[in-house]
Image (cartoon, rainbow, N blue to C red):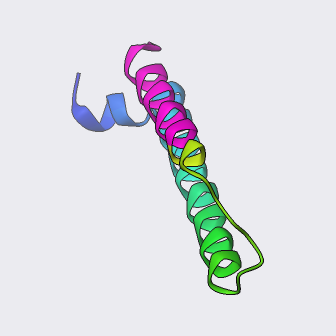
Amino acid sequence: MFLWQQNSEINTLLIHFITALIAALIYIAVTKIRIGLAEKKLTMGNHFFVVGSVIMVLLIGFFLFSS
């Protein structure tokens, strides 16, 4: 099977779309958080970064092992 045939399967396309959507949502969220922090409307503790890291590890594991 050629790579272009495997890359055009619906499962592959769906995973790519979900990954791009999650990346875009994370980018938008980080941008809004940075603006809030710059305007001093928002404060953030260390637990936020720990929870974010755990979520990212879980998402990476989900995408790696869900096939």
- Give how far across and how far down residue 19 sits, in percent: 51, 43
Vertical placement of residue 44 versus 57, above or below: below
Q: Is residue 59 magenta?
A: yes
Q: Quadrant of the C terminus?
A: top left
Return the residue nearer the eye: 20 or 47.
Answer: 47
Return the residue nearer the eye: 40 or 33.
Answer: 40
**Residue in the image at 69% along x and 66% along y:** 43
> Is residue 9 in view from this perspective?
no
> Is residue 39 in view from this perspective?
yes
**Residue in the image at 58% along x and 56% along y:** 26
- Give how far across and how far down residue 10 sits, in percent: 54, 29
**Residue in the image at 56% along x and 64% along y:** 27
**Residue in the image at 68% along x and 72% along y:** 32
Left-right relation of 43 to 22: right
- Give how far across and how far down residue 60 sits, in percent: 42, 30
Q: Main secondary structure of the magenta part?
A: helix
Q: Is residue 53 magenta?
A: yes
Vertical placement of residue 3 versus 46, above or below: above
Q: Which residues are magenta?
A: 50-67
